[in-house]
Image (cartoon, coloured by chain):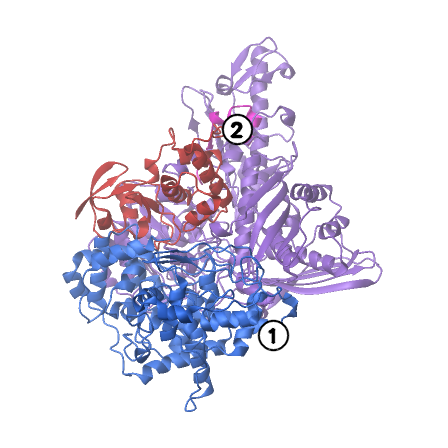
Amino acid sequence: MRRKHWVGAAAACIALGGLAALAVAYRAPLPAIARPDAASFDRARVARGAVLAAIGDCAVCHTADRGAAYAGGRPLPTPFGTLYTTNITPDIATGIGTWSLDAFTRALREGVARDGHHLYPALPYEHYTHVTDGDVEALYAFLMTRPAVSAPPQPNHMIFPLGFRPLLAGWKLLFLHRGALPPRTDRDAQWNRGAYLVEGLGHCGGCHTPRNPLGGEETGRAYAGGVAEGWVAPPLDGSSPAPIPWTADGLYRYLRTGMDGEHGAAAGPMGPVTHDLSAIPEDEVRAIAVYVASLRMDGRPGPGPGPVDHADAAAQAHPAGAALFAGACGGCHEAGAPMLTGGRPGLGLASGLQLEEPANVVRAILEGLRPPVGAAGPFMPPFANSLTDGQVAEVAAYLRARYSDRPAWTNLTRESATARKEGQQP
Amino acid sequence: MTITLTVNGVDHAVDAPPDTPLLYVLRDDLALNGAKYGCGLGQCGACTVHVDGKPVFSCVTPVAAVAGRRVRTVEGLGTVDTPGILQQAFIAEQAAQCGYCISGMIMRAQALLDGVRRPTDAQIRAHMQPNLCRCGTHGRILKAVRRAADMMGGTVPQAVRS
Amino acid sequence: MSMSPLDHAKAPSRRAFLGGGGALVVAFSLAPRALAQLAGGGEGGAGPAVIAPDLKGSLKNHPWLDAWIRVDGDGRVTVFTGKVELGQGIRTALIQVAAEELDLPPGAITLVTADTRRTPDEGLTAGSHSMQDSGTAILNAAANVRMLLTNAAAALWRVPAGGLATTGDGHVRGPDGRLAAYGDLAAGLSLHVAAVPDAPLRNPADYRTLGKPLPRVDIPAKLTGGAAYLHDMRLPGMLHARVVRGPAEGTRLVEPDIQAVEAMPGVVKVVRRGAFLAVVAERQWTAIQALRHLQRAAHARVTAPLPAGAATGAPLSGDAVEAVLNTLTPRDIAIEDTRTPTGPAVHTVQARYTRPWISHGSIGPSCALARFQDGEMTIWTHSQGTFDVARVVTELLGLPAEKVHAIHAEGAGCYGQNGADDVAADAAVIAFAVPGRPIRLQWMREQEFGWEPLGPGMVTRLAASLDADNRIVAWRHEVWSNPHNNRPVGAGGVLAGAEVDPPFAAPEGKPIPMPEGDGSRNSNPLYTFANTHVLYHFLKDMPVRVSALRSLGAHLNVFSIESMLDELAAAAGIDPLALRLAHMEDPRARDVMQAMAAGFDWAGRPRGDGRRGCGMAFARYKNLGAYCAVALEVEIDRETGRAWVRRAFAAVDCGQPANPDGVRNQIEGGLIQSLSWTGHEAMAFSPERRAAFDWSGYPILRFQDVPGTIDVRVVDRPGLPFLGTAEAAQGPTAAALANAIADATGVRLRDMPLAPDRLKAALGPV
C-alpha cells in the first residue's frame, strides 16, 4: 500500500550521484525455466500462499480496476510520473511464467527482476526481505498456480531521469536491510507471529512509519505515522490520536470487518487492506492486532481523551459549515440517524478529525468510501461534485471545531483543491 | 432564508432552510417530479441531478451548497411531447419497468455522454454503477445509453418507435 | 335476513355516470365484497365471491358489462379494472386487450385502475393473475360490448347482424357500406346486462393490437418528470408526515422527546395513538428532522429476539436457516404421494437447499396520501390490494365502510407485500388526527428495510433416484416454510394495528392451498416421476415478519428441483436437458425447453472447464401459469469467487402474449432480479434487530454484475388463454445459476446466496 514514498527516494538517488552506485548496480540475469506444471505444487502450500498473498496485499496493487487478478496494469500515479504494476501471473511472455523460485525470491527480497533489472521500491522489498524461505516458497506456489493471463507490461511514464533503474541500487544500499528478524524471547508466540507478519509481508510500516528526506523509513520513529496516496496513515504508536485508545480486540474488529464501533471505518488506501484480511484465518489477524496494539503500549501509553461534541459552539463559529453538515452529512452522522442507531461510531471517535493534517477528512468528504463491488460494508457517497472546495473547507472546519479540542486547521480550501486534483488523476 | 438557484436555466428564489437537501426543494418548492427519494443516503442514485454539469445525489446536497450554481434535472432534457435524445432512446428501448429509478439513470447517463461521445460498454457500466434498479431493467438501460450515444455521435439511429 | 351473494348481486349498488354530449347513461355495478375468502391474486387477501361460474376471468365475480366498460357519446371508451400498474406494464396490456376486442385504436381507450368506488374488486394484483383474471374478463366483456353494438346496428338498419363488421376505428359497417359510430349506437343501449359466455372473439389472425409490441403508455411521463407516481401528488394544503418507530420490527423507542419536537418551528402536530407515533410538518425536511430528533431516544425490543446468525450481523448460513426453522412446530401437509412399481435405483442423491430471508428492496420507500374531510377518509395507495387497504382502515379507525375510499396510484416496484399496506394505514391514522389537511407520508429507507415483511427463509430436503435406464424411480421433496400469505385484510395485519390502543391481534398464519400454494408453490414437479412424495411442513409461527415476495416458495422449490435434476444428471453422466425432456410429457413444456436449447445453442455450448460453464432450468409457474426455460453461461473469477453471467437466454410461453415486448421486459427483469436474490442477497439479524438498514448492509446487483447479453424468445400461442408471466423467471434463473456454477467448477452450491465469498471458500485456492 505504498505508491509514492519511494518517489522521493528515487529523487534522492540522483542527488547521491550515480557512479559509485552504478558500480554495485549490476545484477546478473537468472536463467529462464520452463513454466512448472500447476499440478506439481503441493496443494497445502498453495493454500498457505493464498493466505500470505492476502496479508501481503499482492492483488491490491497487481490487479487493475475490474481486471484479471494479479495481471497487473494498475496505474500508480505520482507527481513524478505514472508507473504501472506488473503481471505476476505465470504467463510465459508477459508474466512470471519463466521465473524460478530463486528468481522470485531475489525479486521479493532484493528488488531485482529475473532479467537483472532493478525494481522500483513500490514493491516493498525492504519488508519482504524478512519473509521466511518457506513462506516465499508458498507465495511462489500460489502465484504459479494462478491462471496465466497475457497482459503485456504497460510502459511507465517517469520523468527524466527516474526511468534509469540502476539508480535504485544506491537507494537499496541505504535502506534495504536483508535478513530475518530475530524473535523476541520476552514475548509470546502470538506477538512474535504478529511481528513477523506486520514487519514482513504486511509491510504496515510502509505507510504508517514516517520517511526521511531520502525516502527511507525512519526506523527510530517506527509507526509514528506516515502518508499513503495523499492520505495520512495515522500513528500506530503512543502518539495515536484516537479518542478511545486502540486495543487488540478493537484492532481485530477493524482489520477483520473494516469497521470498529469505537473508532470508525477504514477509508482510503486502508479499505482494501481490511478487505483482504476479512477472509484469512482468524488467528493471523488476531496476531497482527496483538502486535499492533503493543506498539502503542511500547510508546507513550495513556488513556484517550474520549470523544467531544461542541455542537453549539461549532455552529456559532462556522454557521455555513453547520448548515452544509446538517443537509449533507447529518442523515448518517447526526444523532438519531439510522447509521448511529445501527451501532456505528459517531464522528467524535474518528481519528481523522484529531490528526494534525486535514488530509483524511478532506479526502473522505471528496471521495467517500465504498465497500468492494457487491460486498456489504461501510459506505459514504463522494461529495466532490456537490461541494465546492470552499464548502468542503467549511464542513471540515466545522467538524474540527465540533469534534476535537485541537487547533483549527488552516488552508483547508487549498487542501481540498489539491486533493480534488489528485483524485482526478488516472 | 431565501436562496437563489438556477434550475434548468431558470432562476428561482426559494424560501427554505439552508440545510434542506436540494431534493426536497426541487420536489416540494419547485414541483419538479424527476428527482426521487430513494434512500436519502447517496447510495441508490434515484435522486441524481446535475450541479454545474456534474452528477450529484440531490438527497445529500444541501440547497445552500447550490446557491448561484447551475442545477439541471430530467425535466431540463425534454418533455413528453419533445423528449431529449436520451429520453427518446429510453422510450425506443422501452427501458423502464416501474420507472422509479429511471430519471436518475438518465441524468447519470447524460453526465457520461456530456463528456464522452463514444463510451465503451465497459465505460457505460462503470459510470452507471452508483445507480440502483430493482426491477432488473439494467440490460435495457445499457442499450438505451448505447443508442443515445449512437444518436448523438452521428450514427444513424434506428427508427424510434412512435 | 340472509342473502346469498347472488341476491346481493341482483340488487347492485348503482352509480350513474352521465356521459358527455348527450350520450347514454350507463349504469355501473359492483359485486358485493366477500371477506375471508381466498380469491383474486391467488395470494390470499379478501376477494369477491364467484356469482357467475360459467363466465371467464373476473367476470365470474362481476358479470355486468357496465362494471368493466363505458361507451361515451363521442365514442370515447373507458375501461375499468380492479388490477393495478406495478411497473409490469399491465395498463398497456389491458388497453391492448380492450382495444382488440372492441376493435378500437388503443388511443381511444381510457383505463381506470383499482378504485373502491369506481372499479370492480378483483382482489390483489399478485400471483401473475392480472392477465388471467382481468385480461380475460376485459377480453370477454369487450367482445360482449362489440356484439351488442353490432346487434344494435343490425336492429337500426334492420339487417342480419351476421353481415356487419367493425372497422377498427369505432364504427360498425353495414353490408352496403353504411357506417354507425359506437357512440351513437351506445346511446340507445344499456350495458347494465350480464355478459354471456359465448360472445364471439376476434380471430387472432386479424388482430390489430393484441400481440403487438405497443409502446407502454406510462413510460414517457416517467422519463420526463411527469406526475407519474403517488409520490408526485400534491394536494392543496398538503402536509408532510413521518411515522416514528424503533429501528426495526419488534422494537419501540423508549420515551422519545416529544415536547422538544412539538416546539420545533414548522411542526404542525405530533400524532399519538397508543404506541403509534408520527410527526406532521409543513415541510418535508422539518418532518424528517423531527423524526431524527425523536429517534435519538433509546430503543427496546418488545417481542422475542430475532434469529441471529452465527456471527451476529452476518448473513445466516444454510445450517443457521435450518436451525431457525427447526425450532418451529410444523403442520404437515401432503402435496403429492404416488406409488409405482419400478426397477432398482442405481444412483441416489440427497441434498438440502436453503434460502435466507430476502428484502423486497423497493427503490422507492413506501408512500401514501390520506385526507379525512367531512367524516370521509380518502386514501391514495400503491398497495397491491386497494380494496384491502379500505377494509384495513375501516376496521383500524372504526369508520363506516362507505366512508372509506381507497384509490390506487402508482408507486415504485414492490414485488409483493412491502411497506405499502402499512404506510397506507399509517397515513390514515395520521390524517384522522389532522382533519381537513391532506397528509403525505413516505417511509424512510431504513423503515422499509427494518419493518417491511421479508420474503421468508426456507429449507428443502430432496432425495431422488435413477434406475439403470436413467429413469427417475423415486422423488422425495420436503419443504419447510412460514406462510407467505400475510396480506392484511383487517387492522391486525398492519403495523399500526399492533400499535394503537387497544391493539388488534395479528391473524394466525395460514397456508395457501394447492394448486397455487405458498411455501409449497411449485413443490410438485411438472415432470413425470415414479414414486413422488412431496410434503409441506407448514410453520405458522413467524420469528421474522414475512409475507409475499414475488414467486413465493417457487423460488426455492424450483431451485431445489432443478438443482437436483442436474445433480442426478451429473451422477449418471447424462445431459441435463435430455434428462428433463425424458421425463416431461407436457408438449408446451417440451417446446419451451427446446426453444431455449435452440436459442442458446445448448448442444454447442462451451463445456465446464473450471472457469466457464453453462446451466439451464425450467419450470411452469405454479404448474398453472407461464412456462419458462432459462440457460446461463457463467464465467468464474476463481480469485474472488465472482460468477458473472456472460450470456442469458430465456424462452417463455404465456399463451397469447398481449404485448410480446412487455413479456420480454418482465422476463429480463425477473431474470436479473433473481440473479440478485440468488447470488447476492440475505437479510442479516442480530438478536435485537435486522442488521441492514441501507444498501451498504443489503447490497443488490449493480451494473457491473449485469449479464453480458440477455435474450428472450416469446413462444407465440395465438388465441390461447393468457398465462401469468411476471414471476415465471424467478425459479428457473436461480437454478440455472447454481447449475452453471456447478458445470464450470464442479462445486455444487445449495445455500443461497451463491455469493462470491461462499464460492471462493468452496473452490479453495487451488
Answer with left or right where residue C66 lies relative to residue B117.
Answer: right
As displayed, is residue C750 above or below residue C517?
A: below
Badge 1: few (under 14), some or many (20 or more) residues near its Cα, within 10 Å? some
Answer with left or right where residue C252 lies relative to residue C52.
Answer: left
**Residue A319 image-quadrant placement:** bottom left
Please, which chain is the residue tagged with disc 1 on? A
- Comparing C579 with A265, the one in front is A265
Q: Which residue is mark 2?
A: C192
Question: Which tint was used for chain C?
Answer: purple
Q: Are marks 1 and 2 on the same chain?
A: no
- Residue B12 in sight in this render: yes
As displayed, is residue A132 above or below residue B141?
A: below
- Comparing C753 with A193, the one in front is A193
Callout in the foreground (1, 2): 1
The reply to whether the magenta stretch includes residue C531 is: no
Task: List x then y, in percent, for residue C44.
Answer: 55, 51
Chain colored red: B
Amino acid type, callout 1: Ala
The reply to whether the magenta stretch includes residue C105 is: yes
Chain colored blue: A
Name the secondary structure under disc 2. Answer: loop
Instruction: Identify the residue shown where x is 35% and y is 33%.
Output: B78
As displayed, is residue B118 above or below residue A383?
A: above
Q: Which residue is mark 1?
A: A44
- Tell me the magenta residue range: C96-118
In space, the residues marked 1 and 2 are separated at their CA atoms by 81 Å
As displayed, is residue C652 above or below residue C297?
A: above
- Comparing A349 with A48, the one in front is A48
